[in-house]
Image (cartoon, helix red, strand yellow):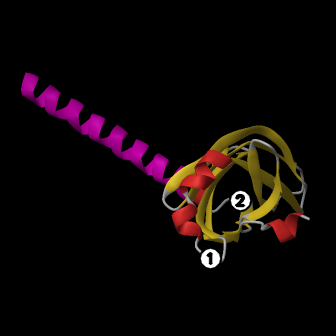
């Protein structure tokens, strides 16, 4: 009798587990089909220089499918040149994505001169540096919560010459 009762308890547990798995699958499928913001990432370009570093920048263009604005929680970025991490950071609370429109965000990256000196081998005659930029754009979506859009781009950017500066 005890074994029959135990077997019946296991069957109920399996039914509950199966029902929970079905519910999780249903919710996951519905969330997968919810419209989400989309983003594109521009290449890295030279923006300016100071006594301590050069400033590079890239732009993220984010489109919002909703008829109300969405808060951007944070933007994280990592810039690698010649396989080495040269700049990384987090931009907390950079603003909002416009309702039913798009918003452009600028991502500045400051690279110290001492690191640039170590990249001289990669620069060569044409003053080009190979890079890879990885960005995580975290947006607060209704019902879903925080949603991170991973972006990356790679290419070459040209360091300024004395002719470009003067």
Task: Tell me the quadrant of the picture where the C terminus can be found.
Answer: bottom right
Q: Position of residue 11 (x, y in %)?
A: 23, 39
At 62% from the left edge and 54% from the top edge, which residue is drawn? 116
Task: Evaluate whether residue 138 shows in this view.
Answer: yes
Which of the two labelled residues, at mark 1 and mark 2, occupies the earlier sequence position? 2
Marks 1 and 2 sit apart, C-alpha to C-alpha, by 44 Å
Few, some or many C-alpha atoms within 10 Å of disc 1 (few <14, some 14-19, many ≥20)? few
Residue 29 lies in quadrant: bottom right
Q: Which residue is mark 1?
A: 125
Instruction: Report the disc number at residue 36.
Output: 2
Q: Name the image quarter holding residue 100.
A: bottom right
Whether 153 is among the magenta residues is: no
Q: Is residue 17 above or below residue 127?
A: above
* Point 59% across, 64% down: residue: 131
Image coordinates of residue 107 in percent, x first then y, are: 77, 52
- Quarter of the rendering occupied by the N terminus: top left
SS of the residue at dot 2? loop
Q: Main secondary structure of the magenta part?
A: helix
Task: Say which of 104 and 31 sits in front.
Answer: 104
* Residue 14 included in the magenta stretch of the image: yes
Q: Report the magenta residues as a range.
A: 1-29
Residue nearest the observer in this picture, 63 or 3: 63
Label 1 with label 2: CB-CB less than 8 Å: no
Q: Position of residue 44 (x, y in %)?
A: 72, 64
Mark 2: few/some/many CA within 10 Å (<14, 14-19, 20+):
some
Q: Position of residue 62 (x, y in %)?
A: 79, 60
């Amino acid at each position: 009798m005890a074994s029959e009762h135990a077997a019946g308890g296991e069957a109920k547990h399996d039914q509950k587990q199966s029902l929970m798995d079905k519910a999780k699958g249903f919710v996951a499928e519905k969330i997968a089909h919810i419209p989400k913001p989309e983003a594109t990432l521009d290449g890295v370009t030279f923006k300016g220089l100071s006594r301590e570093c050069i400033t590079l920048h890239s732009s993220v263009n984010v489109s919002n499918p909703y008829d109300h604005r969405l808060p951007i929680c944070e933007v994280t970025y990592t810039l690698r040149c010649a396989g080495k991490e040269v700049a990384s950071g987090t931009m907390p609370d950079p603003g909002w994505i416009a309702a039913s429109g798009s918003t452009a965000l600028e991502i500045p990256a400051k690279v110290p001169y001492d690191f640039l000196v170590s990249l001289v081998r990669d620069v060569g005659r044409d003053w080009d540096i190979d890079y890879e930029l990885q960005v995580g754009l975290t947006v607060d979506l209704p019902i879903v919560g925080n949603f991170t859009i991973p972006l990356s781009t790679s290419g070459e950017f040209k360091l300024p010459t004395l002719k470009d500066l003067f």
